[in-house]
Image (cartoon, rainbow, N blue to C red):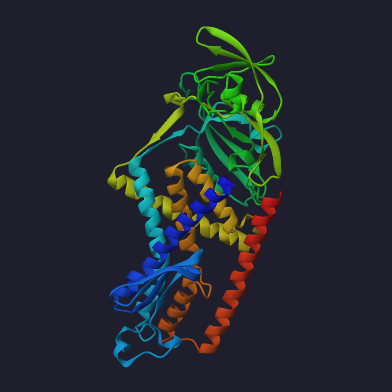
Amino acid sequence: MTSFFSTVLWFVLGLGVLVAVHEWGHFQMARFFGIRVLSFSIGFGKAWYRWTDKRGTEYLLSSIPLGGYVKLLDAREGEVAPELQAEEFSSRPVQQRLLVYLAGPLINLFFAVLLYWGLAMWGSTTLAPIVGRVLPDSPAAAAGVQIHQEVLAVDEQPTDSWEAVSFALADRIGETGEVRLTLQPLDINTGKTTANVQTLALSVAQFMAQAKPELSPMQQLGIEPYWPLMPPVIGEIVPAGAADKAGLRVGDEIVQVGDQPLDDWSKWVDIVRAHPQQALDVTVRRGSDTLKLEVIPEAFDSKKGDHSAKVKQGRIGAQVKTYTRPEHLLRKHSAGVVDGLLQAITKTTDIVLLTFTTLGKMLTGIIGLDNLNGPIAIAQFAGTSAHYGLIAFIEFLAYLSIGLGVFNILPVPVLDGGHVLFAVIEWLRGKPLPERVQQMGLNLGIGFLSLVMLIAFYNDVMRLMH
């Protein structure tokens, strides 16, 4: 239940920030041209809180946190007093109205650039993209990929992190052909490399065309990342938990469970999860002493995957001791003011192009509509990213801001892009489209958006059920 409320909280917070940014773009552009703004709302439905500024604009926080709006003084929506005609929207030059419509999506892209810029200057450290396992009967196995090779590039695009690898592979979604990986052997104990750099061609057919959210792009190629072994040393114990009751203490090293020796914390976690309410004979090293203890993991409901049914798993209420990974397995990223800005602009541009490309592949049937995510999936991503820390959540916000900007700029009536389309046509014709045509377009737009939302909700529910 706590996880559910945490997910909802981070979703509302993230979406609220992005909606506020989006509507602020419309708001500021309208104010710049002297157009009267009647109301500025974050959310829809009943207002929980409202206040009015000295210029007569009403600000609202509303009950349904799935969007927002800016309402302008518009003669098409009601009579306008003579003294306010100069501040009315619909009579303004088409160029001004066009910029007001564009301001929302563009400010979302600008906001993403700011976030990525800040992250680039802040710097980050990531695990090197080293192959840890090659799955049998996979494209990677067929191409001859070996463990402990570092992925230097995907299709000649340099990759210095698993995120970069995934992003490069996402550009190939739905395609059939060859994915080219540039690889270099690396000694995981010393970090030494050899000059034996090779490029392998991995054959794919409709790559990632069917939604498999539990698998990363690399896993769909048959490659699992290498994770350094984490010593199974206890760093924190929950009072009155199973570990505490069994007599485990901070600093204890788990060296054996039954007859099975242990050298990695993740193996210990797997054993505990697989034995809810079952006694485990555990050998621990405490200083110079070796002790044998009986640990009985508590049972709790969990999931094997993001969209799997609940199962019983075990836990003992203990955390691993903080472990510093070897420097030679890490890749550090940082940039100055100018380089950071250029990186942010490039990354935002690449994601915008990738988003349009993916939408095009959906519309043409190259990839399935089951890849479309709705608010439930977005909420899960928000909660997961927040769980991994502030940096991950900011990365998620930037990505979602781009998605919001791109979605709203689509030439679909009802969306900002539809209004932009009507304004451009009016500019070219010298007069607006007939009301009947505009209304027909709005009806089609509402129908299209309703269908998209229905598919997205359906995908979300199906992922939850499986």
User: Which residue is depicted at the point 70% across and 22% down?
Assistant: 279
User: Which residue is depicted at the point 49% across and 51% down?
Assistant: 10
Out of 188 and 139, give the one closest to the viewer.
188
Which residue extends farthest bottom? 82
Q: So how many labels did they put on this image?
A: 0
Relative to 46, residue 280 above or below: above
* Horizontal and vertical percent position of residue 211: 65, 51
Question: Can residue 255 be seen from the camera position used here?
Answer: yes
Left or right, 179 with respect to 111, comes to right
Which residue extends farthest top? 288
Out of 241 and 434, give the one closest to the viewer.
241
- Which corner quadrant of the image does residue 376 belong to? bottom right
Relative to 94, residue 448 above or below: above
Relative to 397, residue 160 above or below: above
User: Which residue is depicted at the point 29% across and 73% down?
Assistant: 32
User: Which residue is depicted at the point 29% across and 42% down?
Assistant: 336
Out of 152 and 286, give the one closest to the viewer.
286
* Horizontal and vertical percent position of residue 344: 38, 50
Question: Can residue 367 be seen from the camera position used here?
Answer: no
* Horizontal and vertical percent position of residue 117: 35, 49
- Which corner quadrant of the image does residue 278 belong to? top right
* Horizontal and vertical percent position of residue 273: 66, 31
Out of 268 and 185, give the one closest to the viewer.
268
